[in-house]
C-alpha cells in the first residue's frame, strides 16, 4: 500500500475554500481538516459538522455531582454524633443545597474533560501538517491521498484557485 501524502490548498477567501471543501467530498480524496484565520460561516456550512458530545459529558458530570454531594452530606451527618433534637438526621432540604453545589462543580469538570476529549487536545501530531499563513491571510483545506495520486490532488486544488503545499 502506498504511503499517505497530505496536500493543503491555500485560498485567499473563505468562499473558494468552502467550495473546495464541498467538491472534495465527492472526489475520492480524504478530507483531513480546514484551517482559518477567522471564523467563517461558509466553511462551517461546507463542513456539515454534527452536534458535539460535550453536553453529554456535562450532564454526566452534573448527575454524578448531585449524587456525590448528597452522599457526602449524608455521610458526614451520620458519621459524627450531631444533636438534632428529635429531627431527622438526614433531611432533604439542607442536603439538596450541597447536592446542587456539587452538581455545578462536577458539571464544570465534566465539561472541561469533554472538551479535551472531543477535541482530542493536546494534538501535537497536527502541527506537522500546518501552514503558518493560515493564521494570517489564507484559508487552508487539508486533504490526504496515496502518494501515487498526489498529482491529481494537486491539480484539484489548483483548479479551485488555490496555492498548493505538500506534506510528506
Image (spheres, rainbow, N blue to C red):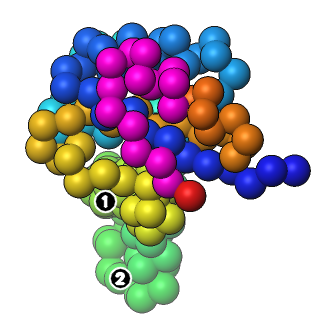
Instruction: Name the quadrant containing residue 65.
Output: bottom left
Quadrant of the snapshot with the C terminus: bottom right
Counting from the top left corner in percent of width and height, residue 118 is at 50, 48
**Along the line of sight, which residue is nearer the eye, 148 or 87?**
148
Q: CA distance from mark 1 to mark 2?
A: 27 Å
Counting from the top left corner in percent of width and height, residue 58 is at 43, 45
Instruction: Name the quadrant containing residue 116.
Output: bottom left
Which residue is at a point 33% across and 26% down the rendered structure image?
Answer: 162
Q: Which mark is residue 82?
A: 2
User: Start and end of the magenta stretch?
Assistant: 154-167
Instruction: Name the quadrant containing residue 34.
Output: top left
Counting from the top left corner in percent of width and height, residue 129 is at 44, 55
> Residue reaching furthest right?
1
Q: Which mark is residue 105?
A: 1
Instruction: Determine whether 158 is above or below 60 in the image.
Output: above
Q: Is residue 70 visible?
A: no
Which residue is at a point 41% across and 76% down the rendered structure image?
Answer: 77
Which residue is at a point 31% across and 59% down the rendered structure image?
Answer: 105
Density class for disc 1 (Cα within 10 Å; few <14, some 14-19, many ≥20) is: some
Q: Of tags 1 and 2, which is closer to the observer?
A: 1
Q: Any magenta on residue 165?
A: yes
Which residue is at a point 61% across and 27% down the rendered structure image?
Answer: 152
Q: Any magenta on residue 116?
A: no
Position of 165 compared to 125: left or right?
A: left
Q: Are marks 1 and 2 in contact (CB under 8 Å)?
A: no
Instruction: Determine whether 104 is above or below 19 in the image.
Output: below
Instruction: Determine whether 123 is above or below 32 in the image.
Output: below
**Along the line of sight, which residue is nearer the eye, 47 or 161?**
161
Q: Secondary structure at mark 2?
A: loop
Amino acid at each position: 500500500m502506498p504511503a499517505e501524502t497530505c496536500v493543503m490548498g491555500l485560498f485567499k477567501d473563505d468562499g473558494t475554500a468552502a467550495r473546495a471543501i464541498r467538491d472534495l467530498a465527492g472526489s475520492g480524496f480524504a478530507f483531513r481538516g480546514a484551517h482559518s484565520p477567522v471564523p467563517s460561516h461558509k466553511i462551517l456550512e461546507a463542513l456539515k459538522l454534527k452536534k458535539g458530545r460535550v453536553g453529554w459529558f456535562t450532564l454526566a458530570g452534573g448527575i454524578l455531582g448531585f449524587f456525590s454531594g448528597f452522599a457526602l452530606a449524608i455521610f458526614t451527618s451520620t458519621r459524627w454524633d450531631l444533636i438534632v433534637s428529635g429531627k431527622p438526621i438526614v433531611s432533604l432540604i439542607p442536603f439538596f443545597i450541597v447536592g446542587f453545589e456539587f452538581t455545578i462543580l462536577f458539571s464544570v469538570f465534566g465539561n472541561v474533560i469533554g472538551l479535551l476529549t472531543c477535541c482530542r487536545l493536546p494534538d501535537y501530531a497536527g502541527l506537522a501538517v500546518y501552514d503558518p499563513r493560515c493564521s494570517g491571510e489564507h484559508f487552508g483545506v487539508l486533504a490526504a491521498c496515496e502518494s501515487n495520486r498526489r498529482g491529481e490532488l494537486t491539480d484539484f486544488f489548483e483548479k479551485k484557485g488555490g496555492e498548493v503545499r505538500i506534506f510528506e
